[in-house]
Amino acid sequence: MQKKLIKSYHFDSGHKGREVTYNLVKRRYFWNGMWNQISEAVRCCPTCQAHAPWRPLERVQHTQPFDPMVKVHFDCQYMPVDQGFKYLAEARCDMTGWVEAIPLKKITANALRRFAVNLIYRFGMISV
């Protein structure tokens, strides 16, 4: 009965959270462990989980490079097939946002190595 009661008040309040649900329930009811039971029910609510903003458990530590093309992010993705090329290898500078890309017919270690070496020859040693 308590679970149905909590669910009803939580739903009727518009999924406002545990404090609102608790305050609505405590106006008419009380039982031992009520706060914990309501907190758990709200935490497990599928609607709230799907629509609540995601918050990381700890702060992200950002690193700021001091020079362009020192820290580079690599990625490969599918693209519409054109002249047999169906992949795109990308490298993006963390500091400036500059993007270098090459089309690939197949993703191979050798092709990605050549891409990275070309960047190193042009910009100097990079950190991935």
Image: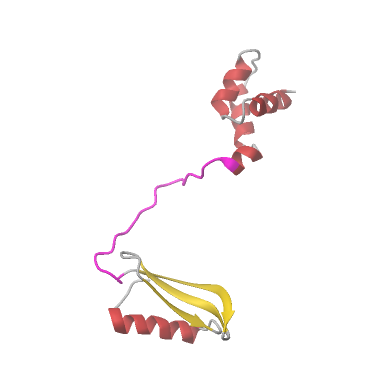
Q: Nearer the viewer, residue 56 or 88?
A: 88
Q: Main secondary structure of the magenta part?
A: loop
State the residue at coordinates (56%, 24%).
Answer: 20
- Decide if residue 53 is on the left or right side of residue 27: left
Q: Is residue 63 above or below residue 68?
A: above
State the residue at coordinates (57%, 28%).
Answer: 18
> Is residue 55 located in the magenta-colored stretch of the structure?
yes
Residue 11: image location, x then y, percent: 66, 29
The extreme right residue here reads 1
> Can I make out residue 124 in this image?
no
> Can I make out residue 112 in this image?
yes
Residue 97: image location, x then y, percent: 35, 65
- Decide if residue 7 is on the left or right side of residue 16: right
Quadrant for residue 125, please give it.
bottom left
> Is residue 106 located in the magenta-colored stretch of the structure?
no
State the residue at coordinates (32%, 59%).
Answer: 63
Quadrant for residue 100, please give it.
bottom left
- Decide if residue 71 is on the left or right side of residue 82: left
Residue 117: image location, x then y, percent: 37, 84
- The N terminus appears in which quarter of the rendering? top right
Residue 88: image location, x then y, percent: 50, 76
State the residue at coordinates (32%, 74%).
Answer: 126
Q: Is residue 118 above or below residue 23?
A: below
The stretch in magenta equals 51-70
The extreme top residue here reads 28
Q: Nearer the viewer, residue 108 or 98?
A: 98
**How many numbered badges does the structure rendering display?**
0
Quadrant for residue 124, please give it.
bottom left
The extreme left residue here reads 66
- The C terminus appears in which quarter of the rendering? bottom left
Q: How is the image coloured?
A: secondary structure
